[in-house]
Image: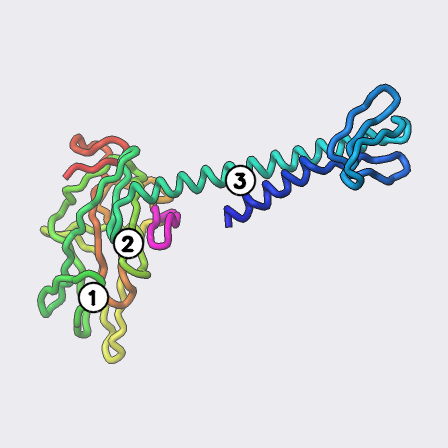
Amino acid sequence: MRIARYVMFFLAFSAFAANVRLYLKDGEYHLVREYKVEADRVRYYSVERGDWEEIPTDLVDLKRTESEIKDKQAAIAAEAKILSEEDKAERERANEIAKVPQGPGVHLVVGDKIHTMKQAESEMKTSKGRSILKVMAPIPIVSGKGEVETKGEHSLNKVNSSRPEFYISLNSEERFGIIRLKPGKGVRVVERVTIVPVTKEIVEEQDQVEIFRQQVDSDLYKIWPTKPLEPGEYAVMECTDGKVNIQIWDFAYDPKAKDALDAGGVKQ
């Protein structure tokens, strides 16, 4: 599409450069390749007759002719600027995509670099025991309530930016975002799960963080909080509603953390 616009632009530019309307005061015009004023005559090269001709200056509407030329030049310059800006934006987008590692995963923006985060292991805890959640694979569960947990009360991944930025490359068309984790005894609660009796409907409750989403490529998004985070435990998550297959990449926001890198960095 962009190539077609370039072709159209250069065709229009070539047509303009080759043809100028030399207006007469009676409203008519000559289509000319170029013209010049010589004393009381206007000498021009006629596109129609392919030769140089002259006409009295008093018969030519030079003001209208020059005004139209300036308008066309301004329009061409504006179009050229738009194409240049679009080309720049396209190059920047391509460079952005290139710096993010390929394949599903989550990557933290650290200044002008990218830090690939390790996925945390999650478990479904019910009265019947625990089940490890597999990537994008729902687990069999029975009626009742449960919690999805991840080990440890605090994440080893610390950021000191209140609005950290992440790239998330999706495994498939899943819901994704940032959630707040609730510390428990030796664990952090990722979500609460209710399995409705009889219908077996699954209700998942997560503490969602409001975020901005910017699609960078077909399955690559950049996300960041719309408002500064409160200190605490968080995770970037990906899941399918009603499948209990949530996958998380955990982190802790601690503005005073000495072992966190600058600009929202992370230290394992």
Residue type marked 2: Asp
Residue type marked 1: Ala
Highlighted magenta segment, given as a residue range? 211-222
User: Which one is nearer the viewer's eye here, 152 or 111?
Assistant: 111
In the rendered structure, find residue 207 and report the number of the disc placed on it. 2
Labels 3 & 2 near each other (Cβ < 8 A): no
Residue 213 shows in the view: no
In the rendered structure, find residue 83 and report the number of the disc placed on it. 3
Residue 103 placement (x, y as % from top left): 25, 52
Task: Please tell me whether residue 120 is drawn above or below residue 43 in the rendered image.
Answer: below
Q: Does residue 213 belong to the magenta stretch?
A: yes
Closer to viewer: mark 3 or mark 2:
3
Q: Quadrant of the C terminus?
A: top left
Residue 145 shows in the view: yes
Closer to viewer: mark 3 or mark 1:
3
Q: Residues within 10 Å of mark 1 (few under 14, many from 20)?
A: few
| CA separation in Å, label 2 and label 1 | 22 Å
Helix, strand or loop: magenta stretch: strand
| CA separation in Å, label 3 and label 2 | 43 Å
Task: Please tell me whether residue 1 is drawn above or below residue 143 in the rendered image.
Answer: above
Residue type marked 3: Leu
- State the SS at label 1: loop
Residue 191 placement (x, y as % from top left): 22, 58
